[in-house]
Amino acid sequence: MRKVYIGDPCYVFKDETWSQICDMIDESYYFNNAGFDWLLITDKRFFIAKTAYGDGSYSLKNHKNQKVSNISVDSGTIACIDFEMLSDFEQQNALDAHKNNHAYITEIQCYDMKNIKTNHDCFIDICTMSIDTKNDDYDDYDDYDDSNYFVNDD
């Protein structure tokens, strides 16, 4: 069994490491690629996938399609990261995100390309769990009123 963090990598990585991740998932990666990859950053290899609608809150479900946790997203991405490869500081960040119901920490039996994957519809499989970011039943991004942020020049 392997302990993993499932959530937005921006809650775990800070400063230079987060900048490196952002450089790797810039606009060309996010919009023109399949939207997922296994990244290697400062000797840390982890899975990262884009969401269908960017920021929001998505449901992590088990193999019985029961909601296990909410995954909050502020970078438009969700990652699955081996907890043991994180520094003490990063582990504390991950624990804080889990405690605040922004991410989920659990143990899984498989941590490889065959068992952690996504498709072009932004459906993410993590062993026996899944996150459907396109057809999620909790769509707070649809309820967000951004009309105050647009200026009408009329």
Image (cartoon, helix red, strand yellow):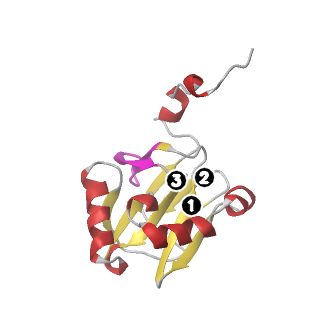
Q: Residue furthest top?
A: 154
| Residue 59 among those drawn in magenta | yes
Please name whichever residue, 65 or 52, is drawn nearer the observer in this view of the structure: 52
Q: Is any part of residue 53 visible from this angle? A: yes
Q: Position of residue 14 (x, y in %)?
A: 41, 66
Name the residue tied to disc 1: 49
Of the residues under marks 2 and 1, which one precedes in the sequence? 1
Q: Label 2's element?
A: loop
Q: Left or right? Give the position of 35 relative to 10.
A: right
- Which residue occupies 27% across, 75% down? 88
User: Please, what is the three-letter code of the amino acid marked with disc 2?
Assistant: Cys
- Which residue occupies 57% across, 46% down? 54
Point out which mark residue 130 bears: none
Neighbour tally class for label 2: few under 14, some 14-19, many 20 plus, Cα within 10 Å: many
Of the residues under marks 2 and 3, which one precedes in the sequence? 3
Point out which mark residue 75 bears: 3
Quarter placement of the N terminus: bottom left
User: Please, what is the three-letter code of the amino acid marked with disc 1?
Assistant: Ala
Please name whichever residue, 119 or 81, is drawn nearer the observer in this view of the structure: 81
| Residue 76 among those drawn in magenta | no
Magenta residues: mostly which secondary structure? strand
Q: Label 3's element?
A: loop
Q: Is any part of residue 139 visible from this angle? A: no
Do the numbered discs 2 and 1 sit on residues whose CB atoms are within 8 Å?
Answer: yes
User: Please, what is the three-letter code of the amino acid marked with disc 3?
Assistant: Ser
**Total number of numbered labels?**
3
| Residue bounds of the magenta highlight | 57-73
- Which residue occupies 33% across, 57% down? 104
Name the residue tied to disc 2: 122
